[in-house]
Image: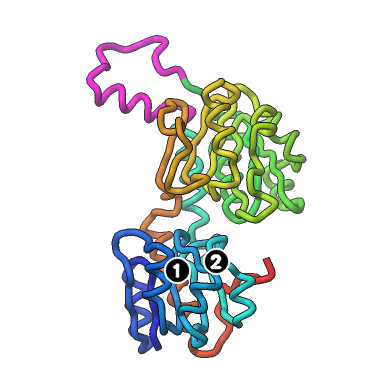
Amino acid sequence: MKIILTQQIPSIATELLKKAGHSVEVLSKNGPLSHSELEKKVVGADAIVSALTDKIDGEIMDSIGKQLKIIANYAVGFDNIDVKEAKKRNIIVTNTPGVLTESVAEHSVALMFAVAKRIVESDTFVRAGDYKHWMPTGFIGQQLWDKTIGIVGLGRIGSMLAEICYRGLRMRVLYNDMKHDERLEMELGAEYHLLPTLLERADVVSINVPLVPSTRHLISAKELRLMKKTAILINTSRGPVIDEKSLVSALKEGEIAGAGLDVYENEPELTPGLAKLANVVLTPHTASATLEARTAMATIVATNVIEALKGNTPPNSVDVQK
């Protein structure tokens, strides 16, 4: 059967798919195609392996043809796929959960340290040749040990982040989620709070929720004003969860101390002024960019496709009701 990968991913996926006897075509090795380009090039596929930058809507599905059996997303989130339209056409949608938990949680911690310790500013200073002597008051940052982290979204990644911060940095853990987590409350002393209370009390706020209608602009001007002036905001989930214009304003005005972002509201475009701020650290959606995570994701994608084309239910089918 014909399988199209919209973008190049680790070669283990292609190897497994070919070993299963399928024809594999990679459309792009240099970034996402436009919607119109994608519409023309996916015709006739039995399976599509999509990336989070590919917007797979009903038009794309119809252009592929009625033989399309599965859209296997190379990501945990699947907000780039119109799952309701897929359901109408009896197309299976899958994702790659579980295998990037550690990598994304680690990246959140890396951003925390980079912002709190002013790592990027200091690096730029040294590379520019401006480091002439030790400075008693130079680049004063914050200590994270024994502080309080507020985790918004206590799924796999949020839970792993809580473990790292509690066990590694003795941080108090506050969380907000759709449900209480009794295990983490018992093991880590994690405290459930409504979002306003969490924002008021946390020294670091980490966003770890999926992008759904109820989480779009979950953090906006009102929420930012609730945070401590010394607080740091971290986002490794999806950009539109934060109102980026309000964030730029809050960072400029000193309403919060800093931010670490791996995702952006209009990715890859940045809200004007964001890149000029010294108190924000920006990474290009690389939280899962470890050899371990990306290889495992590619393996899962291939497995999902192989099982679907056999007529089986893939192990990572998403709830297309969402």
Name the element at disc 2.
Answer: loop
What's the mark number on residue 81?
2
The spot of residue 21 in percent (x, y) is 36, 89
- Considering every residue shown, the one lying at the far left of the view is 129
The spot of residue 58 in percent (x, y) is 55, 72
For disc 1, the neighbor class at 10 Å (few under 14, some 14 to 19, many from 20) is many
Residue in the picture at 43% in, 38% down? 282
Q: Is residue 307 visible?
A: no
- Find out whether residue 212 is within the magenta segment: no
On screen, residue 196 versus residue 282, left or right, reads right
On screen, residue 172 versus residue 113, left or right, reads right
Q: Quadrant of residue 220?
A: top right
* Whole-number angstrom distance, CA of label 1 to CA of label 2: 9 Å
Check the picture and name the quadrant holding the N terminus: bottom left
Quickly name the residue at label 1: 50
Nearest the viewer among 203 and 196 is 196
Label pair 1/2, CB-CB below 8 angstroms: yes
Q: Is residue 244 above or below residue 85?
A: above
The spot of residue 189 in percent (x, y) is 71, 41
Q: Amino acid at mark 2?
A: Ile
- Find out whether residue 116 is within the magenta segment: yes
Residue in the picture at 37% in, 81% down? 17
What's the mark number on residue 271?
none
Name the element at disc 1.
Answer: strand
Region in magenta? 115-140
Q: Quadrant of residue 6?
A: bottom left
Q: Is residue 72 visible?
A: yes
Q: Quadrant of residue 134?
A: top left
Nearest the viewer among 247 and 179 is 247
For disc 2, the neighbor class at 10 Å (few under 14, some 14 to 19, many from 20) is many
Residue in the picture at 40% in, 76% down? 42
